[in-house]
Image (cartoon, rainbow, N blue to C red):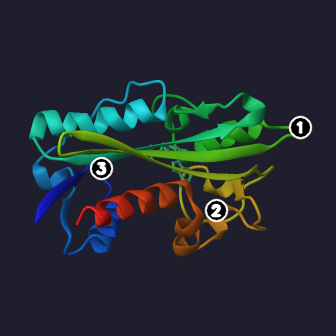
Amino acid sequence: METLIIATHNKHKLQEIQNILQGLYEVKGLSDIGCTDEIPETGNNLKTNALQKASYVKEHYGYDCFADDTGLEVDALNGAPGVYSARYAGEHCSFDDNVAKMLREMEGKTQRNARFCTVVALIKNGETHYFEGVVEGEILTERHGNEGFGYDPIFRPKGYEKSFAELTTEEKNAISHRGRAVAKLIDFLKQQK
Ligand code: IMP
């Protein structure tokens, strides 16, 4: 079976993909190949960062690989925090710090449109492929719900009455940026079999 690495230390992401591609690909995470490195993410856009992570694994470990990168773009903040979403409130900030900063920056603003964007970069058989997923929505004025992570308590997807943090994992994955990008990746990988 072909081996494919997902450039993540997140066991949940790994297991989800392993289940879906069971029997078609042997999917391994970074810890399975002995990679404990802090892989650099120094690009100024999602595509560059996703490719940087996948290329790192290919170059240092020799495996075909895919990696994702996600950002939250807020129209009233001219697209910020975007590619810098993880470090919005500072270098070693928590999810809660980021949410608190976003609520402050958005105080009093009536234009609250925002979107999550994910790019997956896949390096396979010497070629690079990209898969994108987007979910449109709004930044809420206060936190709602306890599920999920990151900006989920203050992001309400378009057409829903609930924030991402009030949806179950299954409900969120069905419409989320990452869910959509990964669905495209999986279609592509299945077609190759
Ligand atoms: P990453 O590229 O998946 O590490 O995502 C970068 C940052 O975007 C994370 O640190 C979170 O702050 C935010 N983020 C990514 N995906 C989500 C999500 O599904 N919900 C809420 N925040 C997210």
Q: In the image, residue 134 lies at what x, y percent?
A: 59, 50
Amino acid found under the numbered disc labelled 3: Thr
Q: Is residue 104 left or right of residue 80?
A: right
Residue 74's image quarter?
top right
Q: Which mark is residue 108?
A: 1
Q: Which mark is residue 8?
A: 3
The residue nearer to you, when weighing 186 against 7, is 186
Q: Which mark is residue 150?
A: none
First along the sequence among labels 3 and 1: 3
Mark 1 close to ligand 1, CB under 8 Å: no
Does the rendering let one see residue 159? yes
Q: In the image, residue 108 lies at what x, y percent?
A: 89, 37
Q: Foreground mark, 3 or 1? A: 3
First along the sequence among labels 3 and 2: 3
Does the rendering let one see residue 37? no
Mark 2 close to ligand 1, CB under 8 Å: yes
Secondary structure at badge 1 equals loop
Amino acid found under the numbered disc labelled 1: Gly
Residue 59's image quarter?
top left
Q: Quadrant of the C terminus?
A: bottom left
Q: Is residue 12 left or right of residue 183?
A: left
Secondary structure at badge 3 equals loop
Q: In the image, residue 58 lies at what x, y percent?
A: 17, 39
Q: CA distance from mark 3 to mark 1?
A: 38 Å
Residue at left 52%, top 71%? 169
Residue at left 57%, top 60%? 176
Residue that carries the numbered disc 2 in the rendered image: 164
Q: Quadrant of the N terminus?
A: bottom left
